[in-house]
Image (spheres, coloured by chain):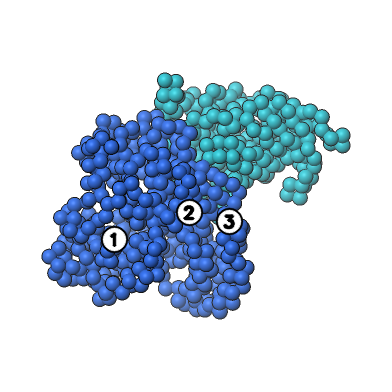
Chain colours: A blue, B cyan
């Protein structure tokens, strides 16, 4: 469940060859869903009718953007997450270019601001260290009011209306603000905030490359991965932005575990983590359970079920385990959190997750775009369908502006209190 | 990955003791023996005491690529190391007693059941020659087309683990396809592997291309080099520390 943003124009008129390739791509997308969706009946959707309705629109498309929109509309009919068209432009992101002997990164970046929309307000929840936002003195708890002169409340209200009742609402709201902050690396973004004293302040911030190292995996566009491991008052703490880079992630877990044999508890912070490689949920779970033969859940493919087994590490951590989630925790994060909750191995703190937990893969289409499609449904070990419902925390703890301004992380604090009490 | 590798190298023509097949069909035992001969013959196999294979692999459609090196040593040692871009290293081994995996994704684990049985068969160096040691029954079930060619279909029931079906080219006697439903921690997964691009390596014919289909995914493995009777470090097949730790814990 990774959000892709269009960074290229895709507005030039299609050549004859491009027309042929987009037509081929359309058919590939349609056929893949027909043949590989776990539900051969597609929940009663007349897929042939969808094809016949949209193919003329594809043939009329004059630009890549239009062709992409037609294919996206086709996938939207499924009303499921993890189906989408990824603009081919993102694949050329972050290609290094030598300028003056120094390697410079190109592509999409941001000013280093993490956002959540809480009670209708776009609040800064975290600032990337050493980022332009940090240098400009932006603080958690500040509210984003305008971006590049445009008020953001209007688009937020539209999304709230369109996605009312959906578990995806929080994720969509956050993605909407984040997308507006993002842009080509090196370009500025003008942001108007309401600061801690409720004063309107405006800052022009440079967009820089995202935090972390560039990660590559197959047909996925390049992504930035970071992991943070530390101890907080003799409690292990692990946070990472995506389930990628297995070597780096597991190395970090190994490091913190070595140092944490006597820890009073452990916190895995998955807030904002959109998922990644599904098998890493199993790999991470093995650090926290001794119970061999268990599983986090099962994915149901058209060919049959496949479990997410947990293989216990030689010396797993036995103390209280808290997992922190929010509306932007999705996919593999939900598989891990939901499974550990069902196994009664962890207590979940935060807010309900995105409910976007369909196992998917990404392929390149003939026209150069990426095509993400879910190939399985997922049911957690406790029998819950996470898609559309998400993981409900054992303890709901919401962020509040006042707490953020005071430098408090109530979700983490509550988890630490629980650990202090011996996990009871 | 394991599935694709299990049908490579010397282990690929392991088979079983045949019972009576349909009258019009040759006995499975005869087909198996002919297959060993087609691959180079018992004498050629017995000249060998180890083998190292290098190659590449790719997951179809996903653009995930990797490299692999497998080590096989008489009488019963095997190690397969796969390095996948963006994933890391996955190592599978059999030291004559323990079947194990050490994965960048899922950590260390000891295999049992079907997985152990398959590792034991694969790990038997020159298992092609003494295939009778591993299977209690083989039956010729018929003739079916594989890639347009008539093949003998043989159901093979091992002494340990689930049965598998192998297909042998009627004309060349070479194994060209293997099917099996493997019971493991991920459930029952049907795998289908095809073998091709047979090339002479020393006195043996070795398939240089295998395509494995399982759970809707397709992995192609291509061999670049196959070397026999080379120097393999003595400790190459030693159990990794993590696996030893798991065994120690299991024994407690």
Going 44% across and 52% down the picture, which residue do you hit? A386
Chain label for disc 3 = A
User: Looking at the image, how many numbered discs can be counted on the residues?
Assistant: 3
Q: Are marks 2 and 3 on the same chain?
A: yes
Q: Nearer the viewer, residue A173 or B33?
A: A173
Q: Which residue is mark 1?
A: A116
Q: In screen coordinates, is A203 left or right of A336? A: left
Please determine whether, in this image, residue A241 is positioned above or below residue A9: above
Marks 1 and 3 close (CB-CB < 8 Å): no
Give x and y (percent) for residue A421: 23, 37
> Mark 1 or mark 2, which is nearer the start of the sequence?
1
Toward the viewer: A302 or A362? A302
Element carrying mark 1: strand
Q: Position of residue A198 (x, y in %)?
A: 14, 67
Occupied quadrant, residue B121: top right
Q: In the image, is B196 to the left or to the right of A12? A: right
CA–CA distance between discs 2 and 3?
Answer: 13 Å
Q: Relative to A398, does residue A297 appear above or below in the rendering?
A: above
Chain ID of residue with mark 2: A
For the residues marked 2 and 1, what is the alpha-carbon distance in whole angstroms?
23 Å
Mark 2 vs mark 3: which is more N-terminal? 3
Residue A117 showing in the rendered view: yes
Q: Which residue is mark 2?
A: A358
Q: Nearer the viewer, mark 2 or mark 3?
A: 3
Q: Which of the pair B163/B241 is nearer the observer?
A: B163
Q: Residue at x 31, y 66 (%)?
A: A177
Please state if B199 lies on the left or on the right of B58 as rendered: right
C-alpha span from label 1 to label 3:
34 Å
Residue displayed at 46% across by 26% down: B239
| Mark 3, residue position | A39
What chain letter is assigned to the residue under label 1?
Answer: A
Looking at the picture, does residue B23 appear above or below residue A72?
Answer: above
């Amino acid at each position: 469940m990774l959000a892709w943003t269009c960074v290229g124009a895709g507005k030039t008129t299609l050549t004859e060859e491009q027309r042929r390739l987009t037509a081929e791509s359309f058919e590939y997308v349609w056929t893949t869903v027909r043949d590989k969706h776990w539900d051969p009946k597609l929940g009663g959707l007349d897929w042939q009718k969808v094809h016949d309705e949209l193919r003329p629109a594809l043939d009329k498309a004059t630009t890549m953007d239009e062709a992409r929109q037609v294919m996206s509309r086709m996938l939207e009919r499924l009303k499921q997450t993890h189906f989408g068209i990824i603009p081919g432009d993102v694949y050329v992101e972050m290609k290094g270019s030598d300028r003056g002997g120094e390697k410079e990164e190109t592509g999409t970046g941001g000013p280093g601001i993490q956002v959540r929309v809480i009670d209708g307000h776009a609040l800064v929840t975290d600032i990337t260290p050493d980022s332009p936002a940090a240098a400009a003195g932006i603080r958690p708890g500040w509210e984003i009011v305008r971006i590049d002169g445009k008020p953001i409340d209007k688009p937020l209200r539209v999304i709230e209306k369109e996605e009312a009742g959906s578990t995806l609402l929080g994720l969509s709201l956050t993605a909407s603000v984040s997308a507006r902050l993002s842009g080509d690396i090196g370009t500025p973004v003008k942001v108007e905030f309401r600061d801690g004293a409720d004063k309107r302040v405006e800052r022009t911030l440079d967009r820089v490359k995202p935090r972390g190292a560039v990660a590559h995996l197959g047909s996925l566009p390049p992504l930035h991965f970071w992991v943070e491991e530390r101890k907080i008052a003799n409690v292990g703490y692990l946070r990472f932005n995506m389930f990628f880079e297995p070597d780096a992630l597991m190395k970090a877990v190994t490091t913190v575990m070595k140092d944490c044999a006597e820890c009073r508890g452990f916190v895995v912070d998955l807030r904002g983590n959109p998922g990644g490689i599904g098998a890493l949920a199993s790999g991470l779970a093995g650090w926290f359970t001794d119970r061999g033969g268990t599983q986090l859940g099962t994915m149901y493919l058209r060919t049959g079920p496949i479990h997410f087994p947990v293989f216990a590490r030689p010396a797993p951590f036995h103390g209280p385990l808290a997992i922190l989630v929010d509306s932007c925790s999705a996919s593999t994060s939900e598989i891990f959190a939901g499974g550990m909750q069902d196994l009664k191995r962890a207590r979940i703190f935060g807010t309900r997750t995105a409910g976007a937990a369909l196992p998917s893969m990404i392929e390149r289409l003939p026209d150069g775009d990426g095509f993400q499609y879910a190939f399985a449904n997922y049911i957690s070990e406790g029998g819950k369908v996470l898609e559309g419902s998400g993981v409900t925390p054992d303890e709901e703890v919401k962020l509040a502006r006042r707490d953020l301004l005071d430098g408090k992380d109530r979700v983490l604090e509550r988890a630490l209190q629980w650990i202090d009490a011996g996990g009871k | 990955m394991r599935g694709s590798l299990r049908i490579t190298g010397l282990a690929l023509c392991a088979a079983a003791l045949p019972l009576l097949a349909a009258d019009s069909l040759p006995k499975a035992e005869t087909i198996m023996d002919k297959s060993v001969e087609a691959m180079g013959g018992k004498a050629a196999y017995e000249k060998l005491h180890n083998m190292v294979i290098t190659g590449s692999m790719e997951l179809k459609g996903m653009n995930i690529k990797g490299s692999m090196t497998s080590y096989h040593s008489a009488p019963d040692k095997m190690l397969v190391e796969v390095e996948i871009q963006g994933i890391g290293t996955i190592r599978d081994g059999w030291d004559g007693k323990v079947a194990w995996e050490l994965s960048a994704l899922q950590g260390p684990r000891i295999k049992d059941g079907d997985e152990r049985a398959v590792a034991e068969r694969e790990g038997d160096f020159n298992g092609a020659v003494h295939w009778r040691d591993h299977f209690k029954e083989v039956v010729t079930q018929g003739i079916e087309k594989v890639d347009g060619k008539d093949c003998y279909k043989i159901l093979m029931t091992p002494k340990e683990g689930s049965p598998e079906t192998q297909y042998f080219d009627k004309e060349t006697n070479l194994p060209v396809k293997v099917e099996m439903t493997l019971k493991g921690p991920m459930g029952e997964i049907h795998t289908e592997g095809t073998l091709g691009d047979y090339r002479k390596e020393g006195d043996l014919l070795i398939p240089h291309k295998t395509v494995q289909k399982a759970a809707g995914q397709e992995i192609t493995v291509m061999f670049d080099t196959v070397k026999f009777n080379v120097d393999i470090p003595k400790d190459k097949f030693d159990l990794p520390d993590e696996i030893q730790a798991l065994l120690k814990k299991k024994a407690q």
